[in-house]
Amino acid sequence: MAKRRPVISKWYQDVSEDEIFEVVAVDDDSGTIAIQYIDGDISEIDFETWQQMILLPAEPPDDLRELEYLDDEELDNPRGNYREPLWEDPFDDSKSDGDEDDY
């Protein structure tokens, strides 16, 4: 029986470990498959291990909040901790007070 080849960006369920993961890379030269679990952990397995695993196709998570590497604060503020600079840009003409000479 021929085993299914890993497909990048497809999700699988490892039946014996009861874990869901996505294939993120396949390296034919080294014979390895990079996978990312739903909690964000990344792992690497070889083709031989892949052939021995009992895998089922799985659906990707419905909500990114299920992925632990993005917390609620990061999802609410996608720009991160960006703050406006505390200094004024000397080349910004939009904040001119009108006392300066135009060149």
Image (tube, grey):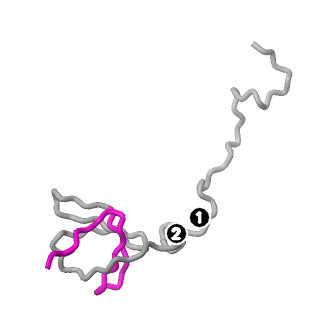
- Does the magenta portion include 51? no
Mark 1 and mark 2 in contact (Cβ < 8 Å)? yes
Identify the disc placed on residue 64.
Answer: 2
Tell me where residue 39 sits by quadrant.
bottom left
- Measured as percent of width and height from the top left, residue 77 is found at 63, 59
Relative height, residue 7 to residue 80 (above, below): below
Query: What is the quadrant of the C terminus in the image?
Result: top right
Which residue sits at x=84%, y=27%?
A: 97
> Image point 61% across, 55% down: which residue?
81
Amino acid marked by disc 1: Leu
Residue 80 percent location from the top left of the image: 59, 56
Disc 2 packing (10 Å; few <14; some 14–19; many ≥20):
some
Q: Which residues are magenta?
A: 1-24
Q: Nearer the viewer, residue 54 or 82?
A: 54
Q: Earlier in the sequence, mark 2 or mark 1?
A: 2
Circle 2 — which element?
helix
| Residue 33 shown left or right of residue 30 in the figure | right
Residue flagged by tag 2: what amino acid is it? Leu
Q: Secondary structure at mark 1?
A: helix
| Residue at x-position 52% and y-position 66% | 70
Is 101 placed above or below 7 here?
A: above
- Viewer-side residue, 63 vs 87: 63
Measuring from the top left, give residue 84's x and y in whole percent.
68, 45
Residue bearing mark 1? 75
